[in-house]
Image (cartoon, rainbow, N blue to C red):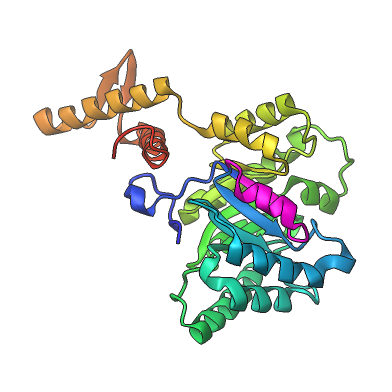
Amino acid sequence: MPGFNHDPRLSSHDFAVRRSELVCPASSLKMMTKAAASGADEVIFDLEDGCALSQKEAARKTLIEAFRAMDFKSKIRAFRPNGVHTKFFYRDVVEVVEAAGANIDVVVLPKVHEAADVQFTDGLLTEIEQNLGLPPGGIGLEVLIESAKAVLHAEEIANASSRMVALIFGSTDYAGDIGARTQVRDEIYLYPKSKTVVAARAAGIQVIDGVTVQFRELEQCERDTRSAAEMGFDGKWAIHPDQVEVINRVFTPSAQEIAHAKEILELYRKADEESGAGVIAFKGEMVDEACLHTERRNLMIARKLGLIKV
């Protein structure tokens, strides 16, 4: 199971890279096949918004076939059931996990409003794992923060289960929930995005930004992705394979960033060993332990992606 904790001081074995999460309808075997072959770090097969009402139950069988037959290589394998409070949720989880649980890494929960929604899902997964003899807690949870209520309860949601691996900010549903107009300025998302990032970081889990709905406008996708990276997100959702390359590029440390991280961390290590100094001067700036988290994170990502040796 990809690692639960995003603390950059963890070993690379525990660290999961989630630069891009590609979502596609679970009703389309063709689209799922294309997603599994893409460059995305995680693929999410969707039984919720991506499936028409008439296709939701039939899509479970297509989804199970995909999990059983496809070669995902090293991708994180996930699916999104319908919301906890819908009539579809229970059968979505039970049928899919019982049939393909050994090939599933993550369940992505939509329309979560409070910690109890996560805890209910945790209990259901625990019973299925016990029944099938799967490793306890082996299936992780990612939770969409996409309503006003979820934003207000983000801290409790992030800490609701040991299965939690990430929070995801769902901008489209959030805008609809608060009654915002379709075309809104970025400022409307500043508070809920910041709250989601802080809640995830305080819980030691990852945090993913939502989609750029203009899937053919790759320049817009790049602008949105750079903004997300600057805010502290680990990655971003994609709804088209063409977005994946853009998102991966932005969230991959550059050669210059890798070299910078190596240099500053080595200087800090030497200062500690040789003089016990906890603060160093680096290119005209004061550097202490608090300044090093981003550098460690960049090296961890680079190692996981094979850009530098372990």
Rendered position, 266 above or below 234: above
> Closer to the camera, 77 or 117?
77
Can see residue 24?
no
All told, the count of numbered labels is 0
Query: Which residue occupies the extreme bottom position in the image?
Result: 131
Q: Is residue 31 left or right of residue 123?
A: right
Image quadrant in which the N terminus is located: bottom left
Q: Nearer the viewer, residue 187 or 227?
A: 227
Q: Which residue appears at 61% of the width and 29% of the height?
A: 226
**Image position, residue 50 (x, y; %):** 79, 56
- The quadrant in which residue 266 appears is top left
Pick out the residue farthest to the left.
Answer: 274
Instruction: Please state if 26 lies on the left or on the right of 262 as rendered.
Output: right
Part of the protein shown in magenta = 21-39
Judged from this view, the residue extending furthest toward the top is 284
Q: Position of residue 260 (x, y in %)?
A: 35, 22
Name the residue located 74 percent from the left edge and 45 percent from the top edge: 171
Residue at 48% across, 52% down: 202
58 is higher (above) or lower (below) than 225: below
Rendered-image quadrant of the C terminus: top left
Q: Position of residue 277 (x, y in %)?
A: 18, 30
| Point 32% across, 22% down: residue | 286
Q: Place residue 257 in its image quadrant.
A: top left
Q: Nearer the viewer, residue 25 or 115?
A: 25
Task: Using the rendered image of the protein, determine whether residue 141 is visible from the camera's viewpoint.
Answer: yes
Image coordinates of residue 246 in percent, x first then y, are 62, 30
